[in-house]
């Protein structure tokens, strides 16, 4: 490594994060950007690598939905057989510049948000948010779910693509996030303000797209109704920023955190593409009426890329409105959570000043060394899926990243550097 | 009075406020709703009654702009002569179910927001927000200003009228405010979230209005760009709610606070329509580059109806992002301000829970007795106009309502009740 100290290496990684310039530049079918999706039946999933038999119920449900959506199978049973007998290849989203919420299931014809990180010239992708209720990402695959995906493929995606192109320059995601973090968003469980800001930015252009008036009304209505629409934009942005930052292959900055419902995986800057995994925890939180903790699926999704970027649970203080939703207490508890997270981070991000934190910037740079030293595990705000396929979201809560991942990463890095 | 105690009377007033149901139901030319505007040349202004010669520069500038907009005069000089020689009748907005920001200048053909308070069946009106920069409400009257007013009359107003009618039920303003107060708005100097929420609610209907596509694009773009658009909606809502509440003609609850640049005026529930006035203060705050405190116009506008409702400066803690803009310090100062205001209020409003205040409701019911007893004068967040006509906004800050108004109101009420 070409740095005089670990701190200097980490600083170089942080400089990349602070200097990042993620722009939303397009929405395209996933297969246009991810060549692997054109090579037979392929499904991307959240988290580190996982085999079909180790996937949770909801992730398997999502895979069934993808097989139905792609027309590989006519029925859920047929899809399930195909998935179980090895006909479908599984690849982690993270391996192909992609992130996916919850199951993270993405196949060839899903429209994906295209985010270009202009500071480093790299791109990242994420499917669009489907809204709430019965949705694929939580494992539902009824006709309602597939019909919505068809509409997103045929109407929403192409419309947003055209509208974004009319903006000429794309949409500056850091600017939208800087505004929204002053408006109660933490970009994981609360994206109300940022979704409105996205609507404000894009609607003048959607109005100019040459298209059917009813379809236009449906697009505007969907964006107006979908409070979490920005989550997936923030995820793609976070992926593009952290992938830019990890071009610095040195240091102990955490560059990815993700979960597949079986294992939690992290990457650190000094160890490049390598995953360090440990058994995943199950989120604790509040449940919708009729559901309880026993029904909760273990933690899953690439959405912890938001916490990796220093927002999500780390920015709980920016979003006291979400603390009650995830069962994390009141304002003082939100403050306590964010303050605790500063103990495992290196600095504050001047891009994202948080008024409710007396204008301190969001957390910047989780240092794997600090996680191990303090024993403080990163907090993640998350949705909670039912453990069975087909049910969907049953609550929201928080979960911790297992310390063992960080220990393994440090050990491997020490070995790589010849320290042990 | 038919109440056993002053506290019981005040509680009846507060019950009206909490039980209010303000809905945005239309946008129409002012003359359609305010019959007085059809009786010759008439101009409405902010604050308690004031003569032309006592109006501030910016309020006079606004009057000149209204005369040009109405076609009563061809030039500013001609308009000024007409206004000075008594050809134009002045009426306070508050006397005709109306409120107006800054100068508050409103004439026959201004489009006004129509808010219906369904709990009491009364209506209130307010012109629409023109955006920032050179705008009539701050005293500018150049061609740019008049052209924008023409566009608002011809395109924006009629479009919003049609769109609101398509919603069938109108837009529930308490619901929009309840959301936005969790997103950093205090509804006086910060209406970013609520303006976005309004955009989100109305845009699916604007898309359905049968109209020219370029005009539609302009409307959506204007609403997307106008961060303070909701201020005027909140003002009309506040007026409708407080006018409903003051149907209870008893008690010491403040039912209006307003300023005309010359005098500050208040009303209390027990004294009906009567104004209690004192010389107005000049706001202190932060100034745009090139301007300073010496150039500030004395305080003006009916926008203090937001503070009367318990938001605005009273809800500073909901909007720490605004505290720096108005020069009121950081997060702790915002907390201190809101906590101080609880000392002159009777209760908290359960409609408007503030996460940053550990989910306490906004202030509810300024008690004139408490203002006099504690000597704590109500704080108001406000824009600052240049004292000369035609310049416009030069900053933003805070100002206090003079205690003398409250003393006079209590004295008059004591006399009415035969107590002195």
Image (cartoon, coloured by chain):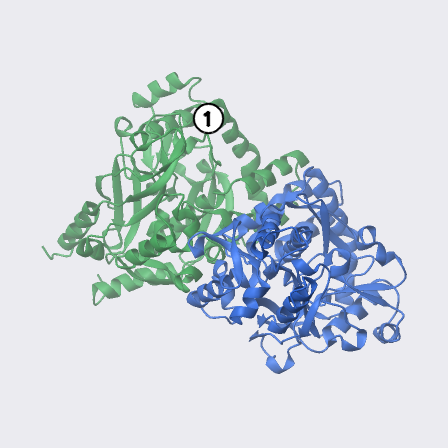
Chain colours: A blue, B green
Q: Residue at x 85, y 57 (%)?
A: A36
Q: Is residue B304 above or below residue A80?
A: above
Q: Quadrant of residue A141?
A: bottom right
Q: Residue at x 36, y 25 (%)?
A: B389
Q: Is residue A226 above or below residue A61?
A: above
Is residue B240 visible in the rendered image? The answer is yes
The residue nearer to you, when weighing A416 against A246, is A416
Q: Quadrant of residue B53?
A: top left
Q: Which residue is mark 1?
A: B69
Find numbered disc 1 in the image and state the secondary structure of the residue it sits on.
helix
| Place of residue B79 in the rendered image (x, y in percent of width and height, measured from the top left) | 38, 20
Q: Residue at x 33, y 23 (%)?
A: B83
| Place of residue A341 in the rendered image (x, y in percent of width and height, measured from the top left) | 51, 64
Mark 1 is surrounded, within 10 Å at the Cα level, by few (under 14), some (14 to 19) or many (20 or more) other residues, namely many
Q: Is residue A131 left or right of residue B246?
A: right
Q: Is residue B117 left or right of residue A237?
A: left
| Place of residue B262 in the rendered image (x, y in percent of width and height, measured from the top left) | 26, 34
Q: Is residue A42 left or right of residue B186?
A: right
* Residue located farthest toward the bottom when viewing the structure as drawn: A294
Is residue B248 visible in the rendered image? The answer is no
The residue nearer to you, when weighing A50 against B169, is A50
Q: Quadrant of the C terminus of chain A?
A: bottom right
């Amino acid at each position: 490594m070409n740095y005089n100290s670990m701190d200097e290496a980490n600083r170089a990684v942080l400089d990349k994060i602070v200097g990042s310039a993620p722009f939303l530049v397009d929405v395209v079918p996933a297969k246009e950007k991810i060549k692997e999706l054109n090579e037979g039946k392929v499904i991307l999933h959240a988290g580190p690598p996982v085999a079909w038999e180790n996937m949770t119920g909801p992730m398997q449900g999502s895979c069934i939905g993808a097989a139905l959506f792609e027309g590989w199978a006519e029925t859920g049973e047929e899809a399930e057989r195909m998935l179980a007998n090895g006909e479908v290849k599984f690849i982690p989203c993270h391996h192909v510049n992609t992130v996916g919420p919850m199951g993270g299931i993405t196949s060839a014809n899903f429209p994906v948000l295209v985010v270009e990180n202009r500071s480093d010239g790299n791109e990242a992708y994420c499917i669009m948010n489907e809204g709430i209720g019965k949705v694929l990402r939580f494992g539902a695959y009824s006709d309602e779910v597939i019909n919505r995906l068809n509409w997103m493929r045929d109407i929403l995606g192409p419309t947003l693509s055209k509208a974004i192109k009319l903006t000429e320059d794309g949409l500056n995601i850091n600017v939208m996030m800087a505004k929204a973090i002053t408006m109660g968003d933490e970009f994981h469980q609360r994206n109300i303000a940022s979704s409105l800001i996205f609507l404000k930015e894009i609607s003048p252009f959607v109005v100019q797209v040459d298209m059917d008036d009813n379809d236009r009304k449906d697009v505007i209505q969907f964006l107006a109704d979908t409070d979490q629409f920005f989550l997936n934009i923030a995820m793609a942005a976070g992926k593009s920023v952290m992938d830019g930052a990890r071009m610095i292959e040195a240091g102990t900055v955490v560059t990815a955190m993700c979960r597949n419902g079986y294992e939690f995986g992290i990457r650190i800057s000094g160890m490049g593409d390598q995953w360090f995994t440990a058994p995943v925890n199950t989120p604790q939180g509040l449940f919708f009426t009729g559901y309880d903790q026993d029904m909760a699926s273990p933690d899953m999704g690439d959405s912890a890329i938001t916490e990796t970027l220093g927002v999500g649970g780390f920015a709980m203080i920016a979003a006291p409105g979400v603390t009650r939703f995830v069962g994390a207490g009141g304002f003082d508890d939100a403050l306590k959570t964010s303050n605790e997270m500063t103990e495992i981070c290196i600095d504050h991000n001047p891009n994202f000043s948080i008024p409710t934190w007396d204008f301190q910037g969001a957390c910047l740079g989780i240092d794997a060394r600090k996680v191990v030293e303090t024993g403080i595990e990163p907090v993640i705000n998350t949705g909670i899926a039912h453990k069975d396929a087909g049910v969907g979201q049953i609550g929201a809560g928080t979960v911790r990243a297992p310390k063992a991942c960080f220990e393994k990463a440090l050990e491997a890095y020490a070995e790589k550097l010849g320290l042990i």
